[in-house]
Image (spheres, rainbow, N blue to C red):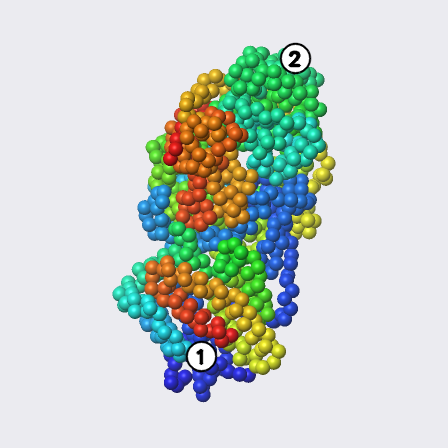
Amino acid sequence: MELTRRNFLKYLGIAAAAGTVQGKIALDLLRPVPSQATTESNVIYKAGVCGICGMNCAMKGKVVDGVLIKLEGNELDQQSGGSLCAKGNAGINILYNPDRLKYPMVRTNPEKGIGVDPKWKRISWEEAFDLAAQKLSEIKEQYGGKAIAWFGGHKGTDFLKAIGSPNDFCHHSTCDTVREVACEVMLGTSAYIPDFAETDYILSFGWDQFGKAKNAWARLMAKALDRGAKLVVFDPRLSPTASKAQEWYPVVPGTDHALVLAMLNVIISEKLYDAEYVAKYTTGFDKLAEEVRKYSPEWAAELTGVPAADIVRIAREFAAAKSAVIPCHKREAAQVHPNGMALVQGMIALMAITGNFERRGGAMFRKKAKLNKVSPPEEAPGLETTIRVDGADRLPILLECGHAVYQSIADAILEEKPYPLKAAIIYKQGLFSMPNPAKFVEAFKKLFIININIQPDEMALLADLVLPDVTYMESATVSVRKYHALYPQIAVSEPMVKPMYETKSRSTIIREIAKRMGIDQYLNPSGSSVRDQQLSLYGLTQKDVIAQGGVISPEGTEVKYKDLTKLSTPSGKIELYATRLAEHGYNPLPTHRDEWILPKPKAGEFYLVTTRFATHRHAQMQNYRWVHEIYPENYVSINKKTAAILGIADGEEVIVESPYGQIKIKAKLTEAIRPDTVCIPHGYGHWSKYLSNAYSKGANDGDLAPARSIEETLEMDPVAGSNNDCHLLVKVRKA
Amino acid sequence: MAAMGEKDLASIALVRRLYEVFRGPDAAGVAELCAGNWVSDVEETLAVLGLARPATWHSLLQQLGTGCHNREQMLEELSVEHTRLFVNAYGGTPAPPYASVYLNDQPMLGGQVTLQVIEWYKRAGVALPPDYPEPPDYLPVELEFVIHLIQSIPEAGTGQAASQLRLVQREFWQDHFRLWIPQFVARTTEESQHPLYTASAEILGAFVQQRAVLV
């Protein structure tokens, strides 16, 4: 055959002559560069900020030829202290997970539900932005901006303001609102730092730091124990933290509050409190003393199962300790039972009357660094209404703290009360962050959902439009140290690698949608110049901070004390009697409410407690390869003796049933839990078949939890609006 | 300067036609399919290379015969199937088009495999533009690299530069390309519900098998 007759040459655009061809075919992608005979790699370190949990440890990324090889802690950061936890190390797994969302996609299957394949189709960003803007504009036109909600981290607050919607939803009422609200009303701040580095005495009410493994706190608490600090743990199960304690009391679930009240009673009646500190820095002591007089150690012993003599002794030890702290973060004993808000109030009072706030080794106030503020070029026109779909407008202090009533949203959508919701933009909120997800799935079927996400999780499956987000390893940020800010400190991150595939940042995505809706002038500016503007307060740019190692401490690294007469409370002091609560008609004292104690379980019934593995953050990391290998699935822990009565063997599948749902899960028999209590680690049972590691492994404890309506929530916790996930009894039987 | 022979040219044309398929469908690609250009080029190059048409060739022709009546629908079907096979799929993406997923110790991108690919590109005098969003071991990029090697080796003549390119080609093919492509092909042919992807994967597999012993 004659080569010149070949049709494919035409395709190649090459003229052939004399049987051979000279010249080259142009390539689409690869570009010529001078070839390098050597194979030397180009190794650099990039400044980063971990995005796995809210601690946001500063880190460094080892990058070779544009490929991220390893993440390491940044030693300049007071939080990471130069090391990362297992979760932080595994962050690279999401960057390079082949399951990751890569391009904008639209569902082609209109049917939605658990186990339904959306049959995605890849589309261009232009198509995606146009579709999002068109749908949202139509809904805004027909039902008003209020028919559009944002779920996730207050990252869309400016967008909601621009469309006039008050429906800014976040998950905290299933997480830590009781701690935050109690701290706000008593201390004028949302949290305190347990200063493990110098503490002598740690009292834990279900607070399982070694189980939860927040980098700075787990590391520093381990050091405190090495130094000989005393750790006393009240927890229905022998948690990782309890296993390291000098004393562990398997308290009756939901009764911790009684212990705190009895300890207050002992310390006040025996005059073991720091009278000078109380007089100088607190208000309402007499009212507190009057309130706790009725809570005797014997009364608490009856409720909690902890011997009265031990309660008295521990109270005396706590008061006598040079420094002592009761750490409180989220979802421990406090958040999951209806006496939770009062429990945190009591914990704060215990530390306050023993003089442990702003004392090294006690509870320190967060010293957050300031940044220059940025605001939108134009002020948004204002909200259409202050009435919110979740009902948070009925919990004024919760709303002032910036939070929502997460659990009530499903009922509100389904019943279209107080008004119909039609669309939601959901960012970084997995379906498994929601209690009773089956109810939320039914609710979400009614909405047009735009999901900005990294993983193809259950929320992505329910979405109409899936928009791929960048990871924190592909983006830049300015991050003020928060959780463990003993002194002001700022970390700056730069993209370690360029965004993979066609992923885009949330701010870019929202700006493009807003532009098409004609409302982008109301959005907060974003981007590199804004980050430089934030840092200009210190006369620095991002580049300068990175040149200084990625972390700066603008006021030095010395710990300065806050003036406890100048707090952001109405009196300026620690308010043992919280006047802000009184002003709103709530109980300002940590009064015990007997009606919120669960009935004793009958045979086959159990209290439920939940936990999570130290290598996982909530339901977000089950598909991360390395940590998946460590804990591929969860289980329900049952006491060996109880299991024998029920005829349940180790590893056998059982049904756990609550008034709200049931799950099938493997049993793990142990002696390290109360015989009347079962424990389930959270985050498993993923049903998204797009998650190749996590799919179908274990079960979701959230299926057992209620998604309480706003009315039910107001009855149980009218102040902080918590869902009280574990205020229930479950039944366990062989599957 | 040596020139490329007919088989080299056929290889380049075939690999480019496959590149178009694996990169993902668009309206222009559907037009090429429906005009018969894609099919005739592939048939001709297979003949030059002495490779058989794949088993699914007939059903592909049938599908194009009926499908081309509604090109918009064909593009939709190809897009959904391309997304399912290679991007994100219910039940796990059958055939992620990234070498590292097959060759790293764990099925993840990045790592040593990607670094090795970058090194071969460097030694062969090519690089991806900084703003190109896909990783270096993305199948369409590696297919372009195959083309680059085929056409730059004769151009380099007989000196040291040519022997370096031949060494790169041998390493790339023996330590990398011939190892992961058969796995990718097996997964694609097993899962594909569209003859364009099944046939293209089969052809890729046959081409790699044939050429791997030559380089």
Q: How far is mark 2 from mark 1, CA to CA? A: 97 Å
Task: Residue B209: give its label.
Answer: none
- In the shown orientation, is residue A346 left or right of residue A111? right
Disc 2 residue crowd, few under 14, some 14–19, many 20+, Cα 10 Å: few
Q: Position of residue A632 (x, y in %)?
A: 49, 44
Residue at 36%, 67% in the rendered image: B199
Q: Disc 1 designates what residue?
A: B7
Q: Position of residue A319 (x, y in %)?
A: 67, 20
Disc 1 residue crowd, few under 14, some 14–19, many 20+, Cα 10 Å: some
- The amino acid pointed to by label 2 is Glu
Q: Position of residue B190 (x, y in %)?
A: 37, 60
Quadrant housing the N terminus of chain A: bottom left
Quarter of the image where one finds residue A375: top right
Quadrant housing the C terminus of chain A: top left
Q: Nearer the viewer, residue B4 or A672?
A: A672
Residue at 44%, 65% in the rendered image: B182
- In the shown orientation, is residue A401 left or right of residue B87? right
Residue at 67%, 42% in the rendered image: A81
Q: Secondary structure at mark 2?
A: loop
- In the shown orientation, is residue A636 left or right of residue A477? left
- In the shown orientation, is residue A276 left or right of residue A178? right
Q: Nearer the viewer, residue A507 or A11?
A: A11
Q: Disc 2 designates what residue?
A: A270
- The amino acid pointed to by label 1 is Lys
